[in-house]
Image: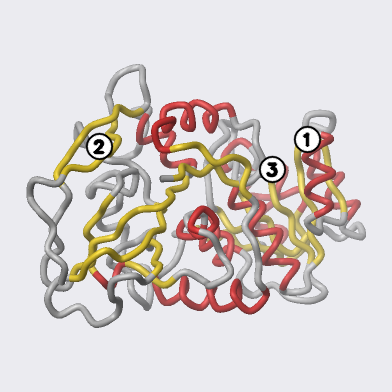
Amino acid sequence: MRATSEEQSMRAFQVSGTEAPVLPVRRRVPVPAAGQVLVRVKAAALNARDRLIVGGRYSAPVPPGRVPLSDGAGVVEAAGDGVTRFRAGDRVMSTFHPAWIYGPFPGWGELYGVQRDGWLTEYIAVDERSVVGVPDHLSYEEAATLPCAALTAWSAVDGIGPGDTVLVQGSGGVSVFALQFARLAGARVLATTSSAEKARRLKDLGASEVVDYARTPEWGARVRALADGRGVDLVVEIGGAGTVAQSIDALADGGRISLVGNLASGGGMDLTRFFQLGATLRTVAVGSRSDFERMNRVVARHRLRPVIDRVFPFAAAPEAFAYFEKGAGMGKVVIGL
């Protein structure tokens, strides 16, 4: 293992607890313990949960000074005693659940940005089991988008194939990845948005039809009509309480809703209508490391490229959060180092 001096310092950003989303700090470069790798972070990506964390609105308490962001990619700088999975020079990325390696969902446990310091830093020391290799064709910026949004989308469309119709909501990271994965699986994809330009780009990515939810508030019926009058087989539900009523209207008999977010306020679902459809509602908790590795094999095989809206330099992390908060982009917002 190459030694790391305790005198070395690094740049990081921490949750501010003030009007500014994050504040710059300097910390000592961590020394990897036994079983850990020290990763020099090259890029980190923002997710919807990060807005809640830095804004003091997250469902669990966030300690003062916590370093945010669960998603990052970088290069192994050094390895602690006993490390066998990686060596210096390997390209790696985070897993959203550091301790969920395989098997059924074990509960939320400790997460980056909440119970653990996250990836908005120049260096991070993590258990070797908590990182995976980066597909060769991806840049660090592209790889940083995968741990949460891509794996959530992958899990959400699991089981979809040719002959199925999928509805994705909006043009955020999860929805765009879900569109890409569903198309790879041979499914037809419909989408909603409120922007003509985003509608064009969603079609370029493979959406067969796009409904403007601003012009058509009762978009569920319109989606059902576009889905051959029978409705869609799967809805990737982003809005939650604010959109699930329309999602039910869009759903086919026996259809499924994959609940991956609850970003829109509203009245909730019509349980009677849901029951009549014989539908299924399933929450998606991102996925395990094993799921992530399986997804990455497909990403590599098809040379799938994530859609990145903007890359901000590290020093402009506060501006990246402000831009992300507006929700005006399409795809992922990334911070490069």
Q: Residue at x 54, y 28 (%)?
A: 323
- Please tell me the numbered disc located at residue 62: 2
Tell which of 5 and 248 is nearer to you.
5
Lower sequence index among marks 2 and 3: 2
Q: Amino acid at mark 2?
A: Val
Would you call the spot at circle 3 few (<14 residues within 10 Å), some (14-19), or many (20 or more)? Answer: many
Q: CA distance from mark 1 to mark 3?
A: 9 Å
On-image quarter of the C terminus:
top left
On-image quarter of the N terminus:
bottom left
Would you call the spot at circle 1 few (<14 residues within 10 Å), some (14-19), or many (20 or more)? Answer: some
Query: Residue 61: where, in percent of width, then height?
Result: 24, 37
Query: Residue 183: where, in percent of width, then height?
Result: 75, 67
Lower sequence index among marks 1 and 3: 3
Q: Residue at x 69, y 72 (%)?
A: 160
Q: Secondary structure under badge 1? A: loop
- Please tell me the numbered disc located at residue 213: 1
Query: In the displayed structure, does residue 302 sit left or right of residue 80?
Result: right
Tell which of 295 and 300 is nearer to you.
300
Q: Residue at x 55, y 56 (%)?
A: 142
Q: Tell me, yes or no, whether the two marked residues, 1 and 3, touch with CB atoms within 8 Å.
A: no
Lower sequence index among marks 2 and 1: 2
Q: Secondary structure under badge 3? A: loop
Image quarter of residue 73: bottom left
Image quarter of residue 314: top left
Query: Residue 334: where, in percent of width, then height?
Result: 51, 44
From this view, report whether residue 87 is shown above or below residue 10: below
From this view, report whether residue 255 is shown above or below residue 9: below
Query: Residue 26: where, in percent of width, then height?
Result: 20, 35
Q: Tell me, yes or no, whether the two marked residues, 2 and 1, touch with CB atoms within 8 Å.
A: no
> Which residue position is annotated with label 3?
170
Q: Secondary structure under badge 2? A: loop
